[in-house]
Amino acid sequence: MEIIKKIGLTLFFIGLLLFTACLHLSKFQMAGELAVDNDVHRTAITNAAAQSGLQGGEPQSIWTFAPRLKTTIKDAQSMLQAEVDAQGLPEGVAEWDYKIGDWKIKEYISSIVSSSTAGPISKSPWLWFFLTFGLGIIGGLLYILPSFAKLPGIKNDHVYHRSYQRGLRLAPRAAVLSLTIAGVLGYGIIYMGGSWIWTALTVAAGAIILYLVMIQQDSAKNQPARSAGPSITGWFGIFTGIYLIGFYILLYWAPSYIQGWIQLVNPISEALSGGPASQWFLYGFMYTIIVIVMGIRMIAKYRHNTYQMIRTGSVMFFQTAFAFLIPEIMVRLNQPYYDFKNIWPLNYTFFFDWNLNKLLDSGGLGIFMLVWGIALIVIAVPVITYFFGKRWYCSWVCGCGGLAETMGDPYRQLSDKSLRAWKIERFTIHAVLVFAVVMTILVLISYFSGSARLGFLNSEQVRTWYGFLIGSAFAGVVGTGFYPLMGNRMWCRFGCPLAAYLGLVQRFKSRFRITVNGGQCISCGNCSTYCEMGIDVRHYAQRGQDIVRSSCVGCGVCSAVCPRGVLRLENASGDIATRTSELRTIHIGEDEVTMLS
């Protein structure tokens, strides 16, 4: 069996190396008519490219071609602006049908890069798909296969000792977080066109949170729990984190540079949606493949627990069908792209003007999608959460949770279990929820009033900053890139606004809880080790206290790894009014059973 694992690991790394090499294999040359649907813009860009020597030049690597193309499009933008300043807009032509808006630059770069590609990948995409994705999938499955031959049950075999899952100690963790935050906020100034006000507001909000946690709640002396083994993360874990962070940076902010990867899935995109692949199709495809393959690993590991097997099958199904296949097939049928399981405020673009217009213009099906989305927010979330807690979504349906539970499972033990982390978590996740609500209110006011400004706030800038800071940097770069460094539920725990909404319902008005039979707890710590949400489950188990934390996603892994059956997921309504009391234990006497609070 060990030889099968080694073969699988070898195939996986060959596929990964070739996948990375695809960024450098293609060449790009601007020749012929540009893939730009606006005649004015196409002519201006063609003229600018001719002047710069880009049109008809020698084939170049993407690292040279993309920056030159961006400069060329900006030159065309300046030329058209100068014409408007000198002569005004041509009669009957709308402003942005003539001028090139900043938001169009990325779109034009992507389309022109896609149509200017030459090289081995574009000539033989299926061959390169097999050499990259194919070898990676086969290798991953071969590596997982021997796990089914082991005896079922959890074995803490070197959980903190393997090079890719040791986690970070306090000092390097602080350094990595500081550098990441500084880099994101610094780039945010560039992203917002040189405006520093949004970075300043974010820094101010962060300072307030730190003050409330460190000073007002006197947590300065409460050191975070080390989410790591005896030494710093092994180099393999550091490399994995850097690779994931780099992938998300390119995906979100430099998609033209990953054209070599996008070409790999072009045939699949054309088969499903009828059009060429984009960065988001690539991401959706990779996301789905990872959830499926790592979901099989999850089933192999937790196959002793029926709940875990069904739950894992659920997230695999919802990601494959609802998040990937159905939206792509709908595009092929000339219907709006729509993920029926995505809920506001996690789906923060739901109330954006372009999305509302798209749904309203799509006839009966579009109206149904709009009503469906609103019904999920105001009816499904509170009602289903009342009966089942937030686990119905966070652990059974959500794609973010599905990725965290499957690809992130090897890192679940790295979540910080300290009181300070819990305090920071409560402030940050609810701050993001407030940010999402305020942004949505501004967007709706702008949609119905026709004015983007409300007092000193501009809804366009607010939603742009939210998309950059929360939708991209927090949810992607940190939320997934930090799996090997600080645990697999960073986004779900500290940032997801929908998790905050669900958590509020779960804590105060839900029948769900994890009940504890404290008399049988042997304090082994398995439950706390495997809790990905940073809950010190053993603390509750030792005291016979039911777990009703709003952050608990009801994954049930703490119950699955408990050797004594101390923990149990239950739904009951008899004690909702007293559920959030600080301590509740059951005292069994000779003549009566009483509950002590």
Image (spheres, rainbow, N blue to C red):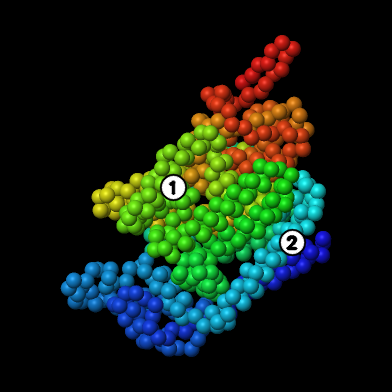
Task: In this rendered view, identify the residue nearer to me: 422 or 336.
Answer: 336
Q: Amino acid at mark 1?
A: Trp
Using the image as rendered, state which of residue 197 and residue 478 is in the foreground.
Answer: 478
Residue visible at 52% across and 77% down? 63
For residue 35, above or below residue 144: below
Number of marks: 2
Residue under label 1: 344
Q: Position of residue 12 (x, y in %)?
A: 70, 67
Residue appearing at x 36%, y 69% in the figure: 104
If the image is split into quadrants, where does the C terminus sit? top right
Q: Position of residue 428 (x, y in %)?
A: 51, 44
Sequence-wise, the earlier of marks 2 and 1 is: 2
Which quadrant holds residue 521? Answer: top right
Quadrant of the rendered structure where residue 437 is? top left
Amino acid carrying mark 2 in the image? Tyr
* In-image side of 475 versus 307 (left or right): left
Which dot marks residue 180?
none
Q: Is residue 245 visible?
A: no
Q: Measure the alpha-carbon separation of dots 2 and 1.
A: 38 Å
Estimate the x, y position of residue 308 in percent, counting from the top left.
Answer: 66, 45
Task: Give whichever of 421, 348 is nearer the camera.
Answer: 348
Viewer-nearest of discs 2 and 1: 2
**Does 78 sit left or right of 481 as displayed?**
left
- Which of 109/234 is in front? 109
Residue found 54% across the figure and 49% down from its top: 398
**Residue 386 located left or right of residue 151:** left
Task: Say which mark, if any, is on residue 143.
Answer: 2
